[in-house]
Image: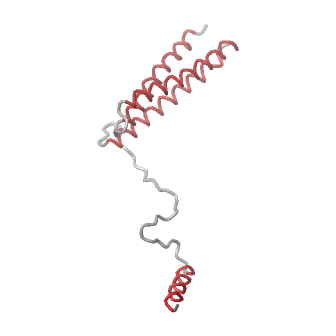
Amino acid sequence: MRQLLLVLASMLTLSSLDTPTIAIAGIKPDLPEMRLVQKFNCNNPQTQIAINECAKLSYQNADKKLNQVYQQLLPTLERSSKQKLIAAQLAWIKFRDTNCEFERSRYEGGSIASSIYSSCLENTTKLRTQELQEYLKSDP
């Protein structure tokens, strides 16, 4: 009984301390996950992590360009053409994503899968951007 009282007293003492965290071996504290932000040299990535991140950034830049061209094209179209472009764009996005998922599946489980997917998204998006730019040029 005396030992139990000592254990309880120690627990109360520990719980009353103003320490932000008490870590118990084997238990991960419930803290927000922290990610280290690292800048990669995308002109010469040296690791697979860097290659993956740089491929993702390249895709994001291509996607921004596509959205800019798309937003330029929409106001130049008549209502019925605008609706057709919106439907075509939605179908194209579904095709792009599904096609790139298929391409990535060949490398499933490998560290290169992420960069394969991002590169596919980037290349397909650049092609679509060129198509939409042609519509802008040929618009009467």
Instruction: From the viewer's side, name the closer residue of 34 and 75.
Output: 34
Residue at (59% x, 23% y) in the render: 90
Q: Residue furthest front?
A: 1
Q: Quadrant of residue 137?
A: top right
What is the x, y in percent for residue 133? 52, 17
What is the x, y in percent for residue 99? 45, 24
Residue 8 relative to residue 122: left or right: right
What is the x, y in percent for residue 110? 34, 38
Q: Quadrant of residue 41?
A: top left
Q: Assign the C terminus to one quadrant of the image.
A: top right
User: Which colour scheme appears in the figure?
Assistant: secondary structure
Q: Is residue 68 above or below residue 27?
A: above
Count the numbered circles shown.
Answer: 0
What is the x, y in percent for residue 19? 52, 76
Instruction: From the viewer's side, name the closer residue of 20 and 3.
Output: 3
Q: Residue furthest top?
A: 140
Q: Residue furthest right?
A: 79
Residue at (36% x, 30% y) in the render: 106
Instruction: From the viewer's side, name the closer residue of 16 and 83.
Output: 16
Q: Is residue 131 above or below residue 119?
A: above
